[in-house]
Image: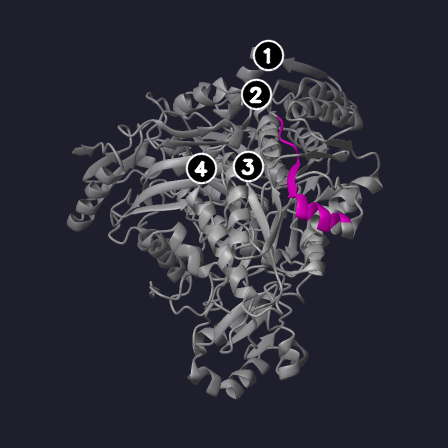
Amino acid sequence: MTTHTPRDEQDASIIIREAAATGTLLNVSGNGTKAPMGRPNQTDASISSSAMAGITLYEPAELVISARSGTPVLEVMRVLAAKGQELPFEPMDYRSLLGTRGDPTIGAIAAMNISGPRRIMAGAARDSLIGVRFVNGRGEVVKSGGRVMKNVTGLDLVKLLAGSWGTLGFLTEVTFKVLPKQERMATLVIRGLDDRQGIEALSMALGSPFDVTGAAHVPDRDRRGGSTLIRLEGFRVSVDYRMNELKRLLKRFRFMDLLEGVGAEALWQSVRDATLLTDQGNRAVWRVSTAPMKGPDLVAQVARSLDAQWFYDWGGGLLWISTPIDGDSGASVMREATRAFGGHATLVRAPAEIRSTLDVFEPQPEALMTLTRGIKASLDPAGILNPGRMYAGI
Amino acid sequence: MTIAFPRPDERVLARRKEIVEGLGRLVASEALIVSEDERRAFETDGLTSYRQIPLAVVLPSTTEEVSAILRFCHANGVKVVPRGAGTSLCGGAIPQADAIVLGVAKMNRVLDVSFEGRTARVQSGITNLGISQAVAHEGFFYAPDPSSQLACTIAGNIAMNSGGAHCLKYGVTTNNLLGVTMVLLDGTVVEIGGEHLDAPGYDLLGLVCGSEGQLGVVTEAVVRILRAAEGARPALFGFERAEDAGACVAAIIGAGIIPVALEYMDKPAIQICEAFAHAGYPLDVEAMLIVEVEGSDAEIDDMLRRIVAIAEPFKPKTMKVSQSEAESAAIWKGRKSAFGATGRVADYICMDGTIPTGQLPYVLNRIDEIVKSYGLGVANVFHAGDGNLHPLVMFNTNVPGEMEKAEKAGEDILKLCVEVGGCLTGEHGVGIEKRDLMTHQFNAADLEQQMRVRGVFDPQWLLNPAKVFPLEGRFAA
């Protein structure tokens, strides 16, 4: 199978134009570290951004960075860190969960709208993504947004491309709004709470004026109550003050510790990357987004039918759930739960033969699928870009 | 009057009686406005120099009524101009002679609030401030705060992806919107997103936000509500040179401080606003920054100490920290009434381009040159942290030709914004005002792609069709 590695936008345009003319189905990727996600699809060739790397603009005083889509995320983070800045949305690294190697690219962060624990406070990748350049399925180079953070000029195709998994266009350059890295991080750990109490504590913290930047609850395996994690970031003076206030606010939950330094960083990394689940061997992994207060009920319903393990991020609104891979890997139970409680579930990790037989993403109502098909056709009329990766026929 | 409206469809005008009767069967009689006098109340919006009396105005009370109206208009080829409160500064809600206005202002209830989940579901005709007021008793608020927040609706905010003075920290509408109930042109009601984060599939919510009423009519919205900070306090810094103010902004951000608001006003704006609001603005400086920080008293003191230390090398002529709630309110009253206060001393058009903040001194000088070359004056107020400019080009309507000159100057300013790497509009929208300038920011491929996506929702160009896209070069998907 041919792998195209265009060196620039013009190259990519020629390759895609040719593919559209010949009906060649293209697998769209960066460095392939998230290849085992989504619906497995049959393609004739692939196009990768791996040869399109490099930061094209960085203005720390304007809080903006642009990079070619194949630039490694770690490179972007390193350049930002040198100026005391970071990507606000704390992108997850999927490699541990998926067992893949290689350099995740900044283009994939945009294309898959990948965020982490700070999403609850700072928004998702799509909220920081302020500009894209891409090649659509006709082979045309299109731009949307730009390098300024306030921009409402025309339809927001930036948002449409974010999270479209390469099915609408091949991203060639992405521009993100960035933020200063905070001086101090501290995490309040409450021990011994069950799920409902844990989410209640997180909700109290998130409903406080203290700008909580991380809110996770990790149940104990033996169901003796878990660890409830509340993170603050900011200037030293501010974090000290707010941590004290937070303890006072949450004083009815006893058994509180303060966690700082590398241990705390490692803990949040394991929340971010969902590695809290990966030592469970060969199991399927689901990512469920729901209203935060419904998280415990949703997971309780799932756990009545399945041997499930889980933890919560985003104040209870994001559930990482592992299930046995037997049968449909828990798909029917999961779909029933999202129907009952609202939200959506994505099968993040499962063997390809399972992912190819069921809906990896939450099925959408027919009216939204009609719009989805229309949008796909408006950007990729020949249906050559990552066909079927998100939904059958898209 | 340099912006053209499309020629009205004579066949639709000829069927006016039949169309009005058809609409009359769908809504109660008090929800249908037919007489010319009453229709005239809807002939313009915040861009008052342009006006068109619509065919009829309907003010539905439910999503079902909106659905029935759109289904009828779709079946009968009648154009629809959606309207919130009509505060658009770019003519986004200005009607057309052959279109009906569909106003959502009657649908203004709060449907559900979850303080634990930090969301509110509201009908789309509620005002921006109305949402904050509905959750204020628990210390919560809705973050985007356009200056028109007392009047503007969340429907209009969603259509324009509105911002405000505090979006440097809290983001704009699209960052605070979790879901919508939207009626498509054929009457289909869709739910996008909900009380959870990050809707599955394509980001239709992100696409709808800022689409200027061209993809559908939003009837309900789920928005994120936030717990307000313990306190907030603004400080004023006056500078002798615009360059110093600009460099001070860069230094504050460079030091890792993101104030909740960072506003810039030039000398004419300071004088106009001070005369109106008596906010204690310094009158002897060329440029002024309002820097607001949030937190507890101690946190605010600490943060302002840092900011004062950063500002000192730029030799501010005045530095004044607000000492009371009343003083803070006056400082913000001055800034937020900049448009209204300017309107008391002159006619003006308000521009809304965004520039990379590093280009600030250059752009301000060029704006001055441009406006002077047309023999006019300008007052500049803008969001300095994000480079969103609001030059108010002042003119006198009673002097023949001045308005046209002001429009030309405005156009030149927006082209300048694009040239330096910015955009035509940061938060007001394109509307009719900037429609014909779109080709300066986008090439044919960019615009065609946007129109193709638009065509998925409205292939016949019935929804707010005179707006956003240049009249030349349009095509049905």
Q: Is residue B297 left or right of residue B165?
A: right
Circle 2 marks a residue in which chain?
A
Percent position (x, y) of residue A295? 60, 37
Mark 1 or 2 closer to N-term?
A: 2
Identify the amino acid type marked 2.
Arg
Residue A360 visible in rendering: no
- Real-space Cα separation, disc 4 to disc 3, in angstroms: 11 Å
- Secondary structure at badge 2 equals loop
Locate residue B30: give its quadrant: bottom right
Mark 3 or 1 closer to N-term?
A: 3
Image marks 3 and 1: residues in contact by CB distance under 8 Å: no
Residue A123 is marked as 3
Is A109 in the magenta? Answer: no
In the image, are marks 2 and 4 on the same chain? Answer: yes
- Real-space Cα separation, disc 2 to disc 4, in angstroms: 30 Å
Who is closer to the viewer here, B396 or A40? B396
Image marks 1 and 4: residues in contact by CB distance under 8 Å: no
Residue A261 is marked as 1
Who is closer to the viewer here, B270 or A273? B270
Q: Is residue B82 left or right of residue B237?
A: left
For the C terminus of chain B, the image quarter is: bottom left
Q: How many marks?
A: 4
Is B272 in the magenta? Answer: yes
Circle 4 marks a residue in which chain?
A
Identify the amino acid type marked 4.
Asn
Which is closer to the viewer, label 3 or label 2?
3
Image marks 2 and 4: residues in contact by CB distance under 8 Å: no
Magenta segment, which residues? B257-274
